[in-house]
Amino acid sequence: MVKLLITLAFAACIFTAQAMDVYPSTYQPPEAPDLLIINASLYVGDGSEIEKGFVHVRQGQIVDVGAGSPVDIESTWVIDAQGKWVTPGIIDVHSHLGNYPSPSYRGSSDGNEATSPVTSEVWAEHSVWPQDPQFPLALAGGVTTLQVLPGSANLFGGRSVTVKNVWSRTVQGMKFPGAPYGLKMACGENPKRVYGRKGSAPSTRMGNFAGYRKAWIDALEYQQSWVRYQRDLTKFEDQRTASDDSSDEEGKDDKEEPSPPKRNLQMETLVGVLDGDILVHNHCYRADEMAQIIDLSKEFGYQVTAFHHAVEAYKITDLLAENNICSAMWADWWQFKLESFDGIQENIPLVHSAGACAIVHSDSAIGIQRLNQEAAKALAAGARLGLTISRAEAMTWITGNAAKALGIDHKTGTLHNGKMADLVIWSHDPFSVYARAEKVFIDGVLRLDIDKGLKPVTDFELGLRIQDTQS
Amino acid sequence: MKRLLILLCLVAGYGHGSPVLIKNAKLAQHGLDNEMLVDILVQGDRFEAVQKASSFADDVYQTLEVIDAEGRWVTPGFIDSATSIGLVDVPGLGVSSDNQVEDFPLGAGFSVSLALNPDSSLIAMAPTDGITRGVIVPAPGNSNYAGQSSVVEFSGHAEFVFYTDNAVHLYLRERDRKFAGGSRAAALYSAMLGLRESQRYSQNRRAFAANKLRPFKLSEADLKALAKVVSGQLVLAVHVDRAADIRAVLTALAEFEAIRPVLMGATEAWKLADDLAARGVPVVLNVLDNTPDNFDKLGARLDNAAILSAAAVRIAFMSSTPFSEFRSLTQAAGVAVANGLPFKRALQAITSSPAQIWGLDSLGSIEAGGIADLVIWDGDPLELMSTPVKTMINGNWVESRTRQSLLARRYLRLSKGQVPDGSTAGLEK
């Protein structure tokens, strides 16, 4: 009990910086119209679908979803989506938009702080350029929320940031309110290549693990230093109170007030993980390495939220399900490096079928524009193998499950009452290659409308890029 | 009657391989009604006849191997207009990449054909996505002229090179300026110099052999290859993005009457659609590559194909990406359709159009006399949810077993709670 209290007190105090909400989100959606979409085919994002139904949005929130025609609902704006599909806004859990923007030059490339294998002190949001023209391209693919991660050169790459895909002058204006931070970690070839080439550690996979373990040991030590400080502070304050009560000048304790340990940004992020406030997103290709990482997380008492790329997730679906770890995967990238040699097109459906959490991610400014198509490819590969998965279930790979991995599933990712009205109206079934996102709403605000030619244009594009006539 | 006699002769054992009849095929290709079902007779490595369904003589249906397509879509085998399958195995591993010459004085004369590997595990994957042929292109390593591509069949046969050295590839993109001192003006100058030298070379071969000509900048291998470009024997594939550069290179190339340029990538080609149509210059597009990731590509857009096609420019598609995304070829075609390209044109861009551009006369369509590459699909071939039911290359059905399918089947049992034991048991159907 005492220990719990100390831990709680400690948690409250160590994260003064976080409690202060530094670099806070300033995203405030403009006032959203009352909106009723009727006669749509709905993929709910939780694995279910409604063949013909409606979605009612009020003040930027979903307030009613149902089958058939709405009864007793009046709305100032009714969209008849006959023959069209509605899904939650698409979520990409692995993106580098803004920190590897277009145009791509050394001067704009800000994704990898490849100067030390442990850089958990860097925050991706300090690299994100909000005028990256790739953001509107992703919006045209229905993407309303994305996690921007540091690159994979380092064992600990830094903190990620989850943003809403809205045009803004500042990153703060895009930050998803209340979304937890993520920590990017990386397995395998990248860290050992980047540092091995420089003649420093790590240069092997075992070197990678030694590096992780050392950092976690340091984090535990840092965590303890704050626990000690808190204990000393409590003792000091108790003594002061006691002496105040005695109101005896003679008995005054002349012991000095303990001073807090110096803040260490690198360690703060790791302790945030140990405390369960920051979610671990671990770049890892090979099954055997993922299994090792799971043991690493047990050694130090933290949870891996998601393996990213997870090209061999299909080989350890049982472990992934057992340990409640999501896998964020590509539909068909493989063999581009040695650790991706065993990639298969059936990876995503195999993970899903084993009852583990499957996600389709992009890691690409091209792929993020068509996550629905990537899901379709994976679904087709599963069907070839005889796996029966419905389209509605596959939709969770790019909506509900993705929201879960980002810790925002109580706010977005499904068409449920009370959720943010992040919605896409598709011209066709989104599993069709011919489908286009016709209208995209974020918090109930129309951000893209191909009929009206409405879409964001970044500062960079003004006067430089001629917009598509087709959209 | 005459036809029946011929057929009976075929059945009697002419040619190699036994004849196959694919009946009730919904033929998806230019010039035929999509709704009409046809029967396709294959003899040896060729299409022998294509007729309205059930219109062959009865004997044919009784005596041949008959595959009933049951009204499914059938397309010619798809042709990828730029890929590196068989030349690059694992891009991240330098040692498995043979597409680039860096520290050796060989440019246009470099022929990828000598390094192609029919045993690459990637090759078997291509037909599982309906792709039966590909143009295997070199990448620039030390010169704007990267070398010569070859066309291969994705059959896994040792003799899989179909057309050796079908085009010389010239790279004039933003990052290719470095091969000519850092300016794209110098890159174009150097490219033209090569063509002029090759012309001088071919007009004075005897003097060249006798060392009586003032020295050439290029090696003899390069000169020989470029001489074929100047004479129009080989296509000149120009990899270029920016509209200004497209204009500049086409204007410069007009110096040579017989030259046959094809634009590759050509991100901003849409700006010059009418000009390209007038000049009869075909364009090979990477449809999905629509980010302005450098200043040459500010005009990148998904409807490049639609605009070019509407202006009557001949277009073809490439899957060319650093990763092994075969499905990106049909995906590209589908996305082009979603962005305004007529379905038929999209299909042509991966069948008859590349066949025409790359000089593959007998490929790209299902018609009598053509090479028998075809795919039976379980749905619309451009849809990502569709899958080839059967793929034929050179008149032979291709086995759909790949390294990837074996891995999938080994671990399929995990979803039923069975950990694989690493033996081959259970892999065979």
Image (cartoon, rainbow, N blue to C red):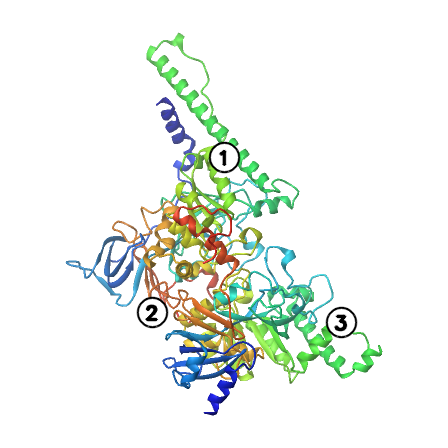
**Residue indicated by mark 1:** A267
The verdict on a common chain for dots 3 and 1 is no
Asked which quadrant contains residue B40, the reply is bottom left
Q: Chain of mark 2?
A: A
Which residue type does callout 2 highlight? Asp
Q: Position of residue B305 (x, y in %)?
A: 47, 74
Residue A334, image x and y in percent? Answer: 52, 56
Q: Is residue A195 above or below residue B155?
A: above
User: Residue at label 2?
Assistant: A451
Cβ–Cβ under 8 Å for marks 2 and 3: no
Residue type highlighted by circle 1 = Met
Which element carries disc 3, helix, strand or loop? loop
Mark 3 falls within which chain?
B
Please state which of the two labelled residues, at mark 2 or mark 3, is closer to the viewer: 3
Q: Residue A407, how many percent across, how many down? A: 37, 44
The reply to whether residue B27 is visible in this rendering is no
What label sits on residue B219 in the rendered view? 3
**Nearest to the observer: residue A356 or residue B190:** A356
